Image (cartoon, rainbow, N blue to C red):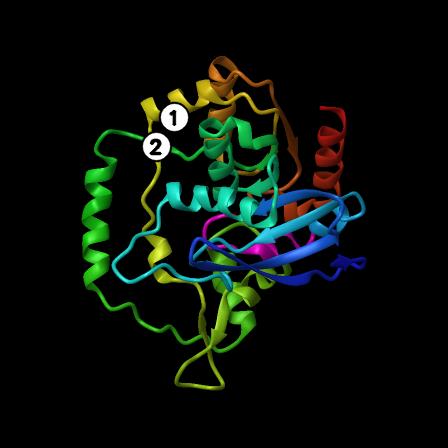
Amino acid sequence: MNSNSGKPIQVFVPATGLNYEGLFWGKKHNKPILCFHGWQDNSASFIPLGPLLASDYAVWSFDLSGHGKSAHIGVGASYNFLDWGLSILHLADALGIDKITTVSHSMGAALSGLMASMFPERFEKLCLIEALFPMGHDLYYYEKKATKLYQSRMKEWPVKEITSEDEAASLRRAAGDMSQANAKLIAQRNVKIHPRKKNCFTWAIDPRIKIPLGSLTYAQLDYHLERLNTPTLVIMGKNGAEFVKEQIENAKFKAKSNIQHTVLKGGHHVHMDEAEKTATCIKSFLEIT
């Protein structure tokens, strides 16, 4: 399987009873890179970056469960960071990848950092964009989150009507700092034909992802930072998320690994805003470490 142009190949990988879909760039015999996206995004967020890495690597970008075209979890279950994180390992197993090198963004980056601290033997290098770990929370976080989860399981989620992919892109753009063009890349993969109105779209993503369970308490965050010893590069947008800067400062004193970080012009989706500069940073890091 080869993708010699900038256009990705659609891929389908079953793992642990769920069907995962995604995109692939490059030649399958090259060294693999696994890419995981941010919350409410999908594998298409790597469309600007993937082709720039494909000459040297086999680039796999997956929709996490509940996102894009991948499967939704069962009725009565809840999305959580541990299961999403373990899916990184399960997908690597399904592809026959023993040592994981990941290029991941936001929630995907946080999941990768967390899994590397738990399973250091499985990770070779981390290229993390706009996150290092999940955000820290106080001891009351789970109590408050449990109430929302309980209420969400009893509600009937409405089937939203979306008139066009452009409207879906505008709705996605309103939730984060990105161009309309980049928002449309993500939105096109997050919508499907409305079940009752053929000239209308609705969200393909599972609405239950809006109430995930899994951020860490501050004590847990410190514990896992101390266990992180995988070579790590963190790429931040100049106008990106403030919590990432705080995590980097904290990691300098607690993480065992030498965490490199760089700041590029752009916002939270810097890998889409500045794909060429992001690719240059990633290639340099992967080649010299």
Q: How many numbered discs sit on the rendered protein?
A: 2
Give the residue at x 54% y 27%.
121
Is 132 above or below relative to 211? above
Q: Quadrant of residue 102?
A: top right
| Residue assigned mark 2 | 216
Residue 160 drawn at (x, y percent): 38, 72
The residue positioned 42% from the left and 24% from the top of the image is 224
Disc 2 marks which amino acid? Answer: Leu
Is the residue marked by circle 2 packed among few (<14), some (14-19), or many (20+) residues within 10 Å? many
Magenta segment range?
Answer: 37-49
Mark 1 to mark 2 CA distance (whole Å): 6 Å
Q: Is residue 41 magenta?
A: yes
Q: Does residue 237 appear anywhere in the picture? A: no
Question: Residue at horizontal 57%, vertical 38%?
Answer: 239
Q: Position of residue 113 (x, y in %)?
A: 50, 32
Q: Which percent across, then down, holds residue 9?
A: 69, 62
Q: Is residue 97 visible?
A: yes
Q: Are marks 1 and 2 in contact (CB under 8 Å)?
A: yes
Could you tell which of marks 1 and 2 lies nearer the N-terminus?
A: 2
Q: Which residue is mark 1?
A: 221
Q: Is residue 83 magenta?
A: no
Depth check: 65 or 90 in front?
90
In the displayed structure, would residue 104 be above or below residue 191? Answer: above
Q: Which image quadrant for residue 271?
A: top right
Q: Main secondary structure of the magenta part?
A: loop
Query: Secondary structure beneath disc 1?
Result: helix
